[in-house]
Image (spheres, rainbow, N blue to C red):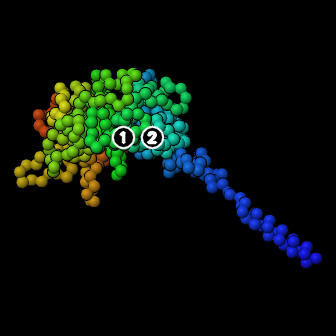
Amino acid sequence: MKHIQAFAWATALLAAGQVAEAQTIFNPAPSRIFGQAVLQQLGLLTATAPNLVEGRELNGPQSLSVDGSSNPPILYVADTGNNRVLAWKNAFGFTKGDPASKVIGQRDFLTTAAQGPGADLSTGLYQPAAVATDKNGNLYVIDAGNNRILRYPAPLAQTGDLLTVDLVLGQGDLNGRAPNAGQSAPSDRTLAFGTSAGIFRAGLAFDSQGNLWVSDPGNNRVLRFPSSALQSGAANDPSADLVLGQPDFSSNSLPPNPDRSKKTFLSAPSGLAIDPKGRVFVADSANRVVVYTPPFNIGQFGSRILGLIVPASGQAAPVINESTLGAVDSNGHATPPQGVFFVGANPYVVDTGNARILGYDPFENNPVVSSMPASVSSCRLNSHSRRRSLLGRPPRC
């Protein structure tokens, strides 16, 4: 009997040991999710937004473009915080809360994680900073987190959810993402929209000849890419033919102790726009807008400055009035103007730091002096002002 009991105990211990060695490994990923529409898979985080996204919401939008080549016009919005661009097929026909017609830079409306080289989607976006459309309805996007510009040909004419890219500016192909393409100095082909410290604001605009103007804030300059380099079938990584804010394509430094009254440089330019006569208006971090007039030459100086006050001798410049742009908070953090747009020939400046839009008379109506005072309107930013701007009307105070 004792032998049987001993055998039974030995068998039980052996079985226990075998079970211990073959323990069941539980699934480390959850099988249910609350707060997002798609279950996140282990090692593949696809949604990073703080709340549910489904294609009708925005997170820190920075730019919009209306494609007038389409009928009805198409509205594109850079949904920067969600790493995508949303498109509505009728810029003036949708109602409050309507979902977007197309998502660009993500595989679907539910995905918000940063995309691009090394991620799930090489043609995707990482903090898009600006959008613009050409006369053929092609969409250009500053993919700031990847230091490049992507062209999506006629997005709403493409079938399927995943859009193709037919041109890359600032990188040799879809695999590059380093500032200045990893080079130690800039060139006529490179761009720098971000650093390890964060992403710059930037801008895009087309002139009447189809040339693309780009603010290159990391290199303290504005580049012009000729229309000939943007034709259908053009090769990636085209060269710019003009630089403003720097004496040449290989320079990107600021002058020592830069004087904001000087028209010889640009400091981290952000928004830009072009008036009907081809003049280029550039907002920069020196709390001003620098105006450049044609004919253009490499490294030319600006012609006018908006936002500059030269006080009378012995007097201090006002902190804020109708001629000032930008603001500095109590901690010394500056918030410069970050956008420029036109309603007819009248320039409007998004004076972000002062929570307002300043409107100016046309260039020809101002005296030939360095600064131009705001004389059309000064409006606090609100939803009504933004809507009037989108509709092509001056903001109403």
Residue 141 locus on image (x, y percent): 39, 34
Query: Mark 1 or 2, which is nearer the eye?
Result: 2
Compare residues 82 and 26 and report the one nearer the observer: 26
* Residue 147 image label: 1
Residue farthest to the bottom, as pictured = 2
- The residue positioned 34% from the left and 48% from the top of the image is 195
- Relative height, residue 175 to residue 14 (above, below): above
Describe residue 92's horizontal placement relative to residue 251 as left or right. Answer: right
Mark 2 lies on residue:
117
Residue 371 locus on image (x, y percent): 15, 40
| Screen quadrant of the C terminus | top left
Disc 2 packing (10 Å; few <14; some 14–19; many ≥20): some
Describe residue 101's horizontal placement relative to residue 260 as left or right. Answer: right
- The residue positioned 13% from the left and 39% from the top of the image is 370
Residue farthest to the right, as pictured = 1
| Screen quadrant of the N terminus | bottom right
Mark 2 lies on a secondary structure that is loop
Compare residues 140 and 54 and report the one nearer the observer: 140
- The residue positioned 23% from the left and 27% from the top of the image is 278
Amino acid found under the numbered disc labelled 2: Pro
Residue farthest to the front, as pictured = 3
* Residue 323 image label: none
Describe residue 172's horizontal placement relative to residue 270 as left or right. Answer: right
